[in-house]
Amino acid sequence: MSTFNDLKRIEAFANLSQAGETLLQQGLVGDRVSARHAVLHQGEPVSGAIVILGGRLRVFTMGPNGNEATLYFVNPGETCVLALNCLFNDHLYPAWVEADLPTRFARIAGPVYRRLFDIEPGVREMTVRSLSTLVYRLMEELDEIHSRPLAQRLAQFVLRHANSQGILHTTQLGLARHLGTTREGIARVLGSPSVRKLFATRRGCIAIKDLFGVRRLLSGPRS
């Protein structure tokens, strides 16, 4: 199926005017990348809006020591808001983006997206909603970084991203990259007696053993 038809399945693009559809097809490119593939680098000019069709992108920062910290994920049907901000304000991209999973996305040329924003209510609504959602996501992340110990941050991340069986497929290094710490720090937390009661670790995954215990940990003191 074409990238254009896939985009039409997303609410913001489902009811474009004829002029909007014609414009979109003129400035649309589809792409498919493997997990860990770099999509945008810090300081790079942004040529277009990115809309996820399948998979997931990870937007992250990197500290002077090389530790990474996830800012937010871009899921199917969503667009990268930092990229939109760069498009509308002529800024260079302020973070890094990589595929967290094998990912398909549409890239809509900047001038085309800006024109669609002007003439298509659905595109305007998606853009404003995405901006609002990002503000809350970033506030939650900052709250966790500044007020929660690592054990609580790890528990929150696993709870948010585990599948319906309570399993998150990731490594200790992967958790460290998301939480802005080191693999050794993650290993110490997972090896502590209190956390071993809550999670089971296997090669390439971590599983929730005691959901109520995880919830008690998250509702406990933040220091």
Image (cartoon, rainbow, N blue to C red):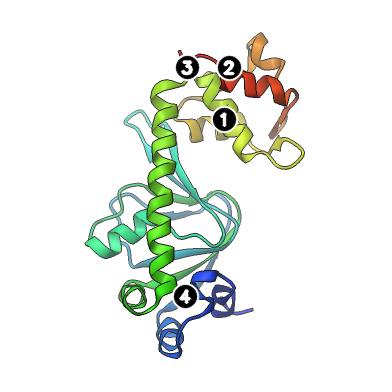
Q: Amino acid at mark 3?
A: Arg
Comes first in the chain, label 4 or label 1: 4
Q: Nearer the viewer, mark 4 or mark 3?
A: 3
Q: Nearer the viewer, mark 4 or mark 1?
A: 1
Residue at left 41%, top 31%? 67
Tell me if residue 97 comes above or below residue 222 in the rendering: below
SS for callout 1: helix
Comes first in the chain, label 1 or label 2: 1
Residue 29: which disc?
Answer: 4
Residue 183 is at least partly visible in this image: no
Distance Cα–Cα, label 4 vs label 3: 45 Å
Answer with the quarter of the image where residue 83 lies. bottom left
The location of residue 112, given as percent across then percent down, is 35, 78
**Mark 2 nearby-residue class (10 Å; few <14, some 14–19, many ≥20):** some
The location of residue 33, given as percent across then percent down, is 55, 60
Q: Amino acid at mark 1?
A: Gln
Comes first in the chain, label 3 or label 2: 2
Question: In the shown orientation, is residue 44 left or right of residue 162?
Answer: left
Comes first in the chain, label 1 or label 3: 1
Distance Cα–Cα, label 2 vs label 4: 43 Å
**Mark 4 nearby-residue class (10 Å; few <14, some 14–19, many ≥20):** some
Distance Cα–Cα, label 4 vs label 1: 36 Å
Comes first in the chain, label 4 or label 3: 4
Q: Which residue is mark 3?
A: 222
Residue 189: which disc?
Answer: 2
